[in-house]
Image (spheres, rainbow, N blue to C red):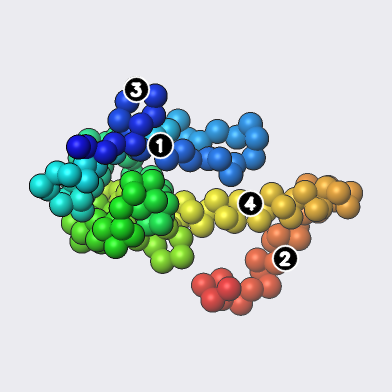
Amino acid sequence: MATALQLGSNSFLNVRYGADRPQGERPAPSLPEVLPLSISHTSSMPLYVQLRDQLRRLIRSGTLPPDFHLPSLRDLSRQLNCSLITVRRVYLDLEREGLLSIQKGIGTFVRSDDEGQSARRSWSRALVFEAFRSAVGTGIRHGMASEEMEELLRELLASIPDKEDA
């Protein structure tokens, strides 16, 4: 008996992204809304092989684009009703193959052709952007003009002796 997670009439793993995004903000259009994964607990093929092969196919076909943030080990294992160790083994195998990039404390990403750290870089940019958004909001609430906030940022950057160590 094959066990597949259902979404409507299709056998898909329903992993939705962006639920924690501010209302009105949409995920990048190139990212799939769901991961089309299904595993059979009764197959003679081990679960990790089924999952690894499906993820490999999704990555190589471009269905999962470079820098796509995969679900956490815990989330994916819960959704697939399989062991966390199984999902970890799949992620590590695909990392060794050069298809995934595992960033400790950040997440697991589909590796880009020019991997250079693009996943980490885009994640870092998003974090810094949100920090700037918060700072600008504070400045506006306190009546500061854009030019004054830009000047403060320049002063801050100039005051850091070695930007690499900050």
| Label 1: how many Cα within 10 Å (few below 14, some 14–19, many 20+) | some
Left or right of residue 73: residue 95: left
The numbered mark, 4 or 2, whose residue comes first in the sequence reads 4
User: Residue extending furthest front?
Assistant: 1
Q: CA distance from mark 3 to mark 1?
A: 12 Å
x, y percent for residue 3? 26, 38
The numbered mark, 2 or 1, whose residue comes first in the sequence reads 1
Under mark 1, the amino acid is: Asn
Dot 2 corresponds to which residue?
155
Number of numbered discs present?
4
* Residue 14: numbered disc: 1
At a point 38% along the width and 46% down the height, the residue shown is 79
| Label 3: how many Cα within 10 Å (few below 14, some 14–19, many 20+) | few
- The answer to whether residue 72 is above or below residue 42 is below
Query: Tag 1, which secondary structure?
Result: loop
Left or right of residue 165: residue 150: right
| Label 2: how many Cα within 10 Å (few below 14, some 14–19, many 20+) | few
Dot 4 corresponds to which residue?
130
Q: In the figure, residue 107 lies in which quadrant? A: bottom left
The numbered mark, 3 or 1, whose residue comes first in the sequence reads 3
Q: Quadrant of the N terminus?
A: top left
